[in-house]
């Protein structure tokens, strides 16, 4: 009988514990489906004496990564530490030694993915990272394998459960951002320092991974335009409903003849769009290919068992490859396509401003839009008041971002305009 293939786990936090639990609970099923037996040989932890959420033989635990990286019998390294350092160094070293790597580390793959993919190819090793985006949602493998006959034109997703929960509660309860954020922190959906989620950093890392695969173009994190949700107010939520839309933090990638656009920001999306019905902490990723048309992948985007499920699927692929003496063909056929500046992106816009309600003010605002070639699709003015500014809302037709910014700069100088309260991009057509 063949000897079991040995795995080393780097990290034993929430996801690491979930992976180990699934491996132990479903070992016979996983071995049968993989066609190869396996065993967890070592687990890297920070503290040997820390209480564990799962029962584990203490002899498997180590605080020394060398016991995994230097062991020639451990052929599969599962990295679940998170963050850039030292995770990147461990993955790099494992691949350099020809060890196969499975990771759920979005930061490492988004920052060093192209380099690690090339390193894996050079050393005949596998590099799998399904758990890095979307938790338990299978999206990486479809992009790498199932949709290879397609030219992917668009990928758009809700890839951060914290922000989706906050925006869902704001919409359903007509609540303020700060109040819902506190609720999310109390429930454990948001960190004490929520910046990575609410400012869009987490979503931007995930978009780098998705767009790089979808468009076969190595994309750097600094090339992704990013805005968070901290400026979204109850007024914006109400106006979105008036226009038949919902506000979501979307990660958007699109292919154009002139280049690729990649952006993360709050977005008005029509209620008829499938992403509009994704609520609470759930994630969803919408993909449009030239042959397959429209697809949507939906499910839990985080958690020990959902993410653990994605990691296990990758482990099974590696076990199968080891059994067959082969390895996965990694992505090396990169395309030479430019990434568009945000100023060159064309979309529609929602603009909410406050202005004094006097004759001629709307004409001045309209003239400022017109001077920069911005066309107005619809407009709402709420309330009347001779002294107090009133809200005025515009939805534009599609226009380049640079023209929109130039028109807003003109409007901001008008004496009758108190402020430009918010600007939100609009996707998916009209009502």
Image: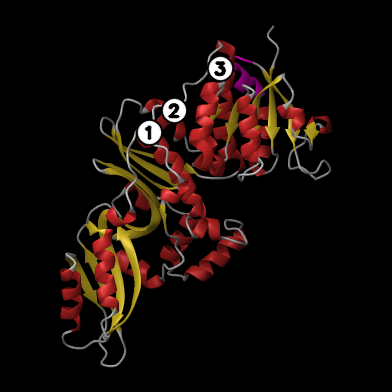
Which quadrant of the rendered structure holds the C terminus?
bottom left
Front position in the image: 219 or 188: 219
Asked whether disc 1 touches disc 3, contact meaning CB atoms under 8 Å apart, the reply is: no
Outermost residue, bottom side? 387
* Mark 1 or mark 2, earlier in chain: 1
Q: Is residue 372 visible?
A: yes
Which residue in the protein does label 2 denote? 331
- Residue 392 visible at all: no
How far across and how far down the image is residue 226, in percent? Answer: 42, 56
Q: CA distance from mark 3 to mark 2?
A: 19 Å
Alpha-carbon span between mark 1 and mark 2:
8 Å
Location of residue 349 in the rendering, given as x and y in whole percent from the top left corner: 27, 62
Taken as a whole, is the magenta stretch helix, strand or loop? helix
User: Could you tell me if the residues under marks 1 and 2 are in contact, i.e. CB atoms within 8 Å?
Assistant: yes
| Image point (28%, 80%), residue name | 413
Identify the residue at horizontal 80%, vertical 45% (top origin). Answer: 50
**Quick one: label 3 or label 2, which is nearer the N terminus?**
3
Q: Quadrant of residue 69?
A: top right
Q: Is residue 11 left or right of residue 160?
A: right
Tell me, for residue 216, which label it has, or none.
Answer: 1
In this picture the colour scheme is secondary structure
For residue 191, side relative to residue 252 (left or right): right
Residue 34 falls within the magenta-colored stretch: yes
Image quadrant where residue 285 sits = top left
Range of residues picked out in magenta: 27-36
Helix, strand or loop under label 2: loop
Query: Which one is nearer the viewer's eye here, 168 or 7?
Result: 7
Q: Is residue 180 above or below residue 92?
A: below
């Amino acid at each position: 009988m063949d000897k079991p293939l040995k795995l080393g786990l780097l990290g034993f936090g929430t996801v690491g514990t979930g992976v180990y639990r699934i491996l132990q609970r479903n070992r016979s099923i996983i071995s049968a489906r993989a066609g190869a037996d396996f065993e967890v040989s070592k687990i890297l932890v920070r503290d040997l004496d820390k209480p564990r959420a799962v029962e584990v033989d203490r002899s498997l635990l180590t605080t020394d990564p060398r016991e995994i990286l230097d062991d020639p019998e451990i052929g599969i390294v599962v990295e679940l530490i998170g963050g850039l350092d030292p995770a990147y160094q461990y993955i790099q070293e494992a691949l350099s030694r020809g060890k196969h790597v499975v990771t759920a580390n979005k930061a490492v793959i988004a920052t060093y993915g192209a380099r690690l993919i090339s390193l894996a190819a050079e050393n005949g090793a596998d590099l799998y990272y399904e758990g890095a985006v979307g938790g338990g949602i299978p999206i990486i493998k479809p992009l790498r394998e199932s949709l290879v006959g397609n030219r992917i034109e668009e990928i758009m997703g809700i890839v951060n459960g914290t922000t989706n929960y906050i925006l869902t509660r704001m919409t359903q309860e007509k609540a303020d951002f700060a109040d819902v954020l506190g609720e999310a922190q109390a429930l454990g959906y948001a960190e004490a320092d929520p910046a990575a989620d609410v400012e869009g950093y987490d979503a931007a890392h995930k978009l780098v991974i998705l767009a790089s695969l979808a468009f076969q173009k190595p994309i750097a994190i600094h090339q992704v335009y990013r805005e968070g949700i901290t400026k979204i107010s109850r007024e914006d939520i109400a106006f979105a409903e008036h226009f038949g839309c919902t506000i979501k933090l979307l990660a958007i990638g699109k292919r154009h003849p002139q280049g690729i656009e990649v952006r993360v920001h709050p977005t008005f999306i029509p209620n008829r769009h499938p992403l509009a019905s994704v609520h609470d902490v759930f994630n969803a990723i919408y993909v449009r290919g030239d042959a397959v048309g429209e697809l949507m992948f939906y499910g839990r985007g985080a958690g020990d068992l959902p993410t653990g499920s994605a990691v296990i699927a990758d482990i099974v692929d590696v076990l199968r490859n080891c059994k067959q003496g082969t390895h996965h063909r990694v992505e090396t056929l990169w395309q030479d396509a430019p990434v568009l500046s945000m100023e060159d992106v064309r979309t529609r816009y929602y603009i909410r401003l406050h202005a004094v309600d006097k004759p001629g003010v709307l004409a001045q605002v309209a003239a400022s839009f017109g001077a920069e070639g911005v066309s107005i699709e619809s407009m709402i003015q709420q309330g009347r008041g001779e002294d107090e500014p009133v809200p005025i809302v515009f939805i534009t037709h599609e226009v380049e971002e640079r023209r929109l910014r130039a028109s807003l700069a003109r409007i901001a100088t008008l004496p009758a305009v108190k402020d430009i309260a918010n600007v939100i991009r609009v996707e998916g057509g009209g009502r």
